Amino acid sequence: MNNTFYELIDENEDFIIINKYPDVSFHSENNEKGLFAKLKEDFNYPLYAVHRLDKITSGLILVAKTSEIASEISKMFSQRKIDKYYVAVSDKKPKKKMGLISGDMKKARNGQWKLTRTFENPAITRFSSFKYEDKYFFILKPYTGKTHQLRVAMKSISSPIIGDVLYGGTNADRGYLHAVKLEFLHKGIKYHYENIPKNGILFNNEYIREKFLDILSEGKTSLKKIERC
């Protein structure tokens, strides 16, 4: 299905996997059709959302086909049994190259959220980064699913995402945050999805794409660093 909302990656009897394009709202808003409404229209049978991506964010989304599967997958997300990885780009040097970003989140002004120094119900993200020319490229692994979690995390290390003007990022052709990888076990089968981003000038670079692939490849030391740091 060719459209301006998404690309279909995989489909089976229990779920579909899509690649959401950037600047597409998950839910309909301001009389404009959102991604989920478009999916239900295209597939013409009930679908159940189990997670979502912000409008500026592109990448992999899993959508359930039954309420039972939706309940099961939602529980897997809450129990951290689904591994998610994102890639991001900033033009500001991070406080450190890799590590842990953790803290409670609370609402701030103008639709923003902010990270606090308390840890009652913290947002948790691990990250690793590398520099290419004058930009900084990140692999992010969230262990929780808070609103704007990765955008806030990036701002907290002084590296707001390019295109994310809400959190101080430089204006650009798109928001440079992409859900690049999903891994999970379902009915005894290990599912592994990888989708290296193509949309956007900074993502559409052969060296960067190869570097992301190298870091995300199973067994690579760079990926193990993000798990252990």
Image (cartoon, rainbow, N blue to C red):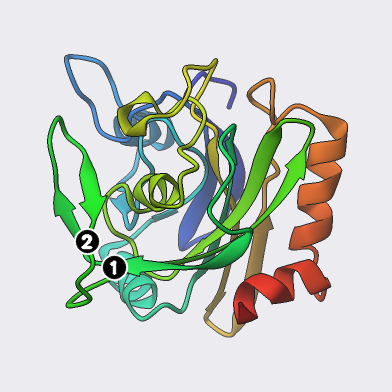
SS under mark 1 = strand
The residue shown at (46%, 79%) is 81
Find disc 1 in the rendering and name its residue: 103
Q: Residue at x 25, y 15 (%)?
A: 32
Determine crowd level at label 2: few under 14, some 14-19, many 20+ residues with C-alpha closer than 10 A: some
Q: Residue at x 33, y 29 (%)?
A: 25
Asked whether, in this view, residue 134 is left or right of residue 186, the answer is: right
Left or right of 217? Residue 89 is: left
Q: Are marks 2 and 1 in contact (CB under 8 Å)?
A: yes
Residue 93 is situated, as x and y percent measured from the top left of the image, at 59, 42
What is the secondary structure assignment of the residue under circle 2?
loop
Residue under the point 46% across and 45% down: 158
The spot of residue 10 in percent (x, y) is: 61, 50
Left or right: where 122 falls relative to 86? left
Considering only order in the chain, which callout, 1 or 2, is on the residue closer to the N terminus? 1
* Residue type marked 2: Thr
Residue 206, quarter of picture: top right
Q: Which mark is residue 151?
A: none
Residue 121 image offset from top left, x and y in percent = 20, 74
Observer-nearest of 48 and 5: 5
Above or below: residue 151 compared with residue 181: above
Residue 16 image offset from top left, x and y in percent? 50, 51
Using the rendered image of the protein, determine whether residue 1 is visible from the camera's viewpoint.
Answer: yes
Circle 1: residue type:
Gly
Residue indicated by mark 2: 116
> Can you say whether 70 is above or below 194 in the image?
below
